């Protein structure tokens, strides 16, 4: 295998110093960019390097947690928009995959308040068109969305992990076997990789995080896995905001109200009080999992806490709200972009590590 053809702008033994100059980690991280099409059959080729997967990990095995962060950018964004937050998470000890996925359309525009569309659109993007994740699980087909099984988030994740696990050791991937732990073989899986064949992700070792549209993919995925195979955790930045629109009461989309396979105690979120979509996010956090579930954080931890510029005391909460003035147009992006609000990194650390417990 020619691994060099997929590596772009590699930062070898990158001594991680966060660009905002408010956070510095002594953990050296290494990084590579990977062309999605090179990881598996049927995966579309990305024409621009900015749209390649970003893979970041601590360079030293002793500083590397056996936990993966899967990060999903928002609508129309490239992985280049999340380089810093991904490097930040790697500086905390996680292996990080900043995954390029089919996000060239905007779910809110495509669905426009059509309740059923949100679930079908997100389900198809995550699992692939007409693909049931496992026996007894639903399949999805939204007529305005065109995501094949091969290009789905799950299949792209699996094929990237398989690819990384079978690279030859390099400075940018010093222990390829590290990635193998996030896969398990199962002949019943509808997803296939080049080296291991039919596989599933080891969700108990995976934190799914994302911003805006990508942040909405996290709870849709978490809710619709088999009950016996929930996520380790999910982190939602300014998400989800799926709602039925003004003509239909701006209610939470029905998929928000469905029971979640992943316990709501594993849901974490950050929004900005001045975000124009923030009221929908707030409503969806409260309604997540349906009546009586407690919403994001579960029944025992469902309060929102204002953390100001990100450095405020979160008080153990799992619903955090920024209130520092960043200018209204920047509010939606400020939760995941430290160039807008440098001190937000304090909240990132709290969320990615589940309040320092992971």
Image: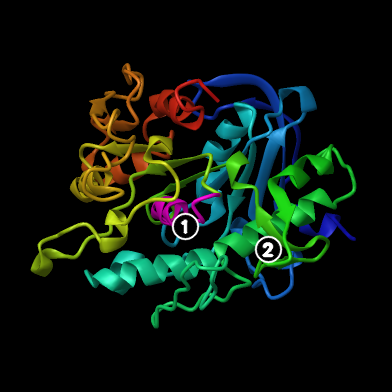
Helix, strand or loop: magenta stretch: helix
Q: Secondary structure at mark 1?
A: loop
Residue under the image location 68 percent in, 22 percent down: 27
Q: CA distance from mark 2 to mark 1?
A: 16 Å
Percent of width and height locating residue 318:
35, 31
Crowd class of label 2 (few under 14; some 14 to 19; many from 20; radius 10 Å): many
Q: Which residues are magenta?
A: 216-228
- Does the stretch in magenta take in 287? no
Percent of width and height locating residue 47:
64, 69
| 248 horizontally vs 32: left or right | left
- Does the stretch in magenta take in 225? yes
Q: To which residue does mark 2 refer?
A: 36
Residue under the image location 32 percent in, 60 percent down: 255
Name the mark on residue 77: 1
Residue under the image location 29 percent in, 48 percent down: 288
Q: Quadrant of residue 205?
A: top right
Quick one: 161 or 347, which is closer to the camera? 161
Residue under the image location 48 percent in, 26 percent down: 349
């Amino acid at each position: 295998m020619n691994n060099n053809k997929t590596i772009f702008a590699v930062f070898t033994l990158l001594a991680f110093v966060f660009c905002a100059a408010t956070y510095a980690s002594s953990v050296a991280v290494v990084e590579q960019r990977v062309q999605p099409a090179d990881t598996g059959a049927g995966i579309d080729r990305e024409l621009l390097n900015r749209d390649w997967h970003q893979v970041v990990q601590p360079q030293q095995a002793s500083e590397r947690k056996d936990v993966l962060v899967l990060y999903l950018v928002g609508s129309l964004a490239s992985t280049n928009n999340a380089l810093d937050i991904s490097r930040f998470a790697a500086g905390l000890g996680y292996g990080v995959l900043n995954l390029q996925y089919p996000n060239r359309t905007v779910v809110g525009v495509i669905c426009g308040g059509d309740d059923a569309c949100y679930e079908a659109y997100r389900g198809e993007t995550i699992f692939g068109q007409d693909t049931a994740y496992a026996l007894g699980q639903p399949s999805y087909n939204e007529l305005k969305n065109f995501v094949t099984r091969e290009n789905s988030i799950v299949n792209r994740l699996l094929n990237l992990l398989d690819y990384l696990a079978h690279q030859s050791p390099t400075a940018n991937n010093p222990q390829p076997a590290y990635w193998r732990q996030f896969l398990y073989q199962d002949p019943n899986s509808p997803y296939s990789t080049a080296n291991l064949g039919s596989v599933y992700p080891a969700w108990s070792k995976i934190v799914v995080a994302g911003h805006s549209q990508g942040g909405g993919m996290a709870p849709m995925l978490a809710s619709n896995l088999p009950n016996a195979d929930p996520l380790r955790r999910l982190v939602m930045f300014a998400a989800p905001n799926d709602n039925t629109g003004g003509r239909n009461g701006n209610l939470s989309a029905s998929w928000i109200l469905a029971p979640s396979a992943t316990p709501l105690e594993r849901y974490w979120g950050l929004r900005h009080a001045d975000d124009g979509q923030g009221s929908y996010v707030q409503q969806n956090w409260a309604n997540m999992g349906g009546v009586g579930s407690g919403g994001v954080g579960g029944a025992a931890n469902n309060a929102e806490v204002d953390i100001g510029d990100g450095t405020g005391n979160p008080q153990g909460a799992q619903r955090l709200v920024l209130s520092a003035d960043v200018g209204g147009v920047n509010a939606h992006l400020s939760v995941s972009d430290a160039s807008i609000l440098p001190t937000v990194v304090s909240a990132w650390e709290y969320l990615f590590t589940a309040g320092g417990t992971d």
